[in-house]
Amino acid sequence: MSLTELIERTRRLPASKQQKVIEFFQARQRDGEVVHRLRPVGGLWEGLSVDLTAEDIDDARRAIWSDFPRENLL
C-alpha cells in the first residue's frame, strides 16, 4: 500500500477512527525518530496454565546449548 492510498483510506474513516490513526503515529514518533515501545511480557502466558520451574528452564537451556558448535568460540 502506498502512502497516497493510506492517506485516502484514512480520510474515508469516521473522525473518531482518524483520531486513533493520528494518535497511533504520534505515539511512535519523537523528534522525528520512530520510537519502538517494548511491551511488558509479564502476562504473556496468562491463562495458558503453563507452570515452568527454574529447573525446567535450566534443562531446556542445557538441551539447546548441548549441540552448539564450540570450536568457533574464542
Image (tube, rainbow, N blue to C red):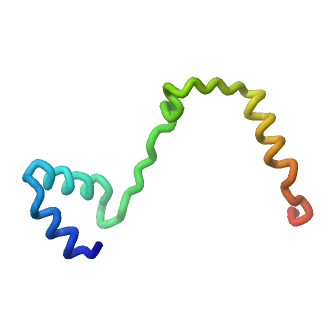
Picture quadrant where residue 33 is located:
bottom left
Residue at point 64%, 24% (across, down): 51
Picture quadrant where residue 4 is located:
bottom left
Name the spot of residue 56 as percent of width and height, x first. 75, 30
Q: Nearer the viewer, residue 73 or 21?
A: 21
Q: Nearer the viewer, residue 34 or 2?
A: 2
Name the spot of residue 58 as percent of width and height, x first. 78, 34
Q: Quadrant of the N terminus?
A: bottom left
Q: Quadrant of the C terminus?
A: bottom right
Residue at point 30%, 66% (across, down): 32
Side (left or right) of 2 relative to 33 = left
Residue sitting at the far right: 71
Q: Vertically, is 29 above or below 1?
A: above
Side (left or right) of 48 relative to 36 = right
Picture quadrant where residue 22 is located:
bottom left
Q: Vertically, is 30 above or below 39?
A: below
Q: Nearer the viewer, residue 54 or 2?
A: 2
Side (left or right) of 61 relative to 35 = right
Name the spot of residue 23 as percent of width and height, x first. 21, 52
Side (left or right) of 38 relative to 54 = left
Residue at point 50%, 28% (across, down): 46
Number of labelled discs?
A: 0
Name the spot of residue 26 as percent of width and height, x first. 24, 56
